[in-house]
Amino acid sequence: MASDGKSSSWTATRRRVARAIARVRADYAAGAPSPPHPAEPPVPADLLILLCRIGVALVGASETSARVQEILDKLSRRYGTDNIHFMVLPTAVFVRVRTAEGSAIDMLDASVGTLPLDQIAGLYRLIDHIEADAPPPREAARELDAILSAKPGSPPWLILLGQVVLTVGLGMMLNPAARALVGYVVLGLVVGALTQLADKVRLLSLALPVIAAALVAVLAFGFPGTLSGGQPTQLVIPAIATLLPGAMLTNGTIELATGSMVAGASRVVYGINMLFLLAFGLYVGISVLGPLSNPTVSQAQLGWWAPLIGVLLIGFGHSWRSSAPQNSVGWLLLVLYVTYLAQFVGKTLSGPLTGAFLGGLMAVPAAYLIQGRKHAPPRQVAFLPAFWMLVPGGISLTGVSEVVMHTTGTTAASGLEVVVSALLSVMSIALGVMVGSGLSATRTPNVGPIIDSMLPQGRHLPWQHQAEAAERSDPDS
């Protein structure tokens, strides 16, 4: 009986095992259930990459962080996304995507450098294309690749010539001394050659401010009679004007004033550091020469027309050196002369600070005004040469170099007063640019329709396109 019980128990166990094996075989024959597909990301990866790359390119176009963020927000809404938040710094673009499970954060290093004017024009044309048609992100990315990888429109020899012409133009505007013209040409050639060589030699690019300023000091103070008519300090600013961090300091001041403290502080610190590197280069160059002689000073000056010719040379020099788009030189000159006239009137009526404010104030509306005209460049392309003509960092460097030359015994002037005046000048230009941007904005108060009423009919200006796009996107309008 006991053996019969064990036999029946063993038989039941074998049956259970057989049924389990049969179920496994049946499941295997039917196929295992496929794992669930991962949820689609809330924002396509190619769109995020495109927007971040456009943000980096806009940083290279000398836009402020707030302006870059505004453009990126507008482009993301054009692609139908409203859960993306951007944070723009001078060195990186951060993006946060909100999802039901939380947030995802990514960043892209902003190492594009300063873009030439033709690439800036292509970038803004791409932005306009996205706002109008919203092409697929991969197609827009290929267009962006073509813009950023394109060679400069000006060949190397024309870029060098543009540097020389720009130096002469700045010299004629700031110091129209007849004997200094030779010095402007020589130093423009030296700085232009060093700049092009630094594009190929990384070690030289890191030390370019010091080396360029030192060579300028050696030539200007070593040959004062031949190159400057006995006034070598007047050669310094025009010669190294293209190395001055004027845009960096002014944009940093604007960002600090508008609440972008991290971006503004980093720009200002970088600009001040660049000024001290340039001043150190001047100190090295003057120290190498040893005791300086006092040459005979020539008082020969060019006529009242010299600054006007200087502005003309600045326009052509910038267009060649920075590879301006074709058929845009006339528009650049128009903005340059409007800016210079405003600066001259303000300086004559009240002083340099008022002139700097009015120059920055008029440059932005003038650039907005021509945008949309036939063959006219985008606003930023028309604005930058006028902005650089104001030389906001030039006065700052003057203050630092006065302190340096005071320590070497070449001048008795106190640098403290000049440094304070320089900082006030940068703030004046920044305030003028902010007010000018506010007058040209799409929100009220708005001078756009007023200006448009004085122009030929039949063509919309940029603020009209923006206002119409805002009305179409606003369901409550």
Image (cartoon, rainbow, N blue to C red):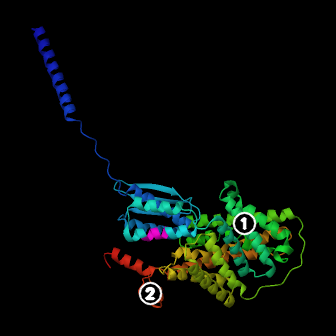
Q: Does label 1 or label 2 sit earlier along the sequence?
A: 1
Q: Which amino acid does label 1 sit on?
A: Val
* Mark 2 surroundings within 10 Å by alpha-carbon count, few (fewer than 14), some (14 through 19), many (20 or more): some
Near-viewer residue (395 or 322): 322
* Mark 1 surroundings within 10 Å by alpha-carbon count, few (fewer than 14), some (14 through 19), many (20 or more): many
Q: Is residue 266 above or below residue 436?
A: above
Lateral position of residue 176 relative to residue 141, left or right: right
Residue 415 rendering spot, x and y as whole percentages: 77, 73
Residue mark closest to the camera, 1 vs 2: 1
State which region is magenta: 123-128
Residue 174 picture quarter: bottom right
Q: Is mark 1 on a helix, strand or loop?
A: helix
Q: What residue type is labelled 2?
A: Pro
In percent of the image, x 66 and y 86: which residue is there? 344
Q: In this view, does 149 lie above or below 71?
A: above
Residue 469 rendering spot, x and y as whole percentages: 37, 76
Residue 163 picture quarter: bottom right
Disc 1 marks which residue?
Answer: 191
Near-viewer residue (135 or 29): 135
Residue 76 rendering spot, x and y as whole percentages: 40, 65
Residue 138 in sight from this viewpoint: yes
Lateral position of residue 28 relative to residue 334, left or right: left
CB contact under 8 Å: marks 1 and 2: no
Q: Is mark 2 on a helix, strand or loop?
A: helix
Residue 415 in sight from this viewpoint: no
Q: Is residue 300 above or below residue 52?
A: below
Near-viewer residue (268 or 301): 301
Disc 2 marks which residue?
Answer: 449
Assign the C terminus to one quadrant of the image: bottom left
Main SS, magenta region, reads helix
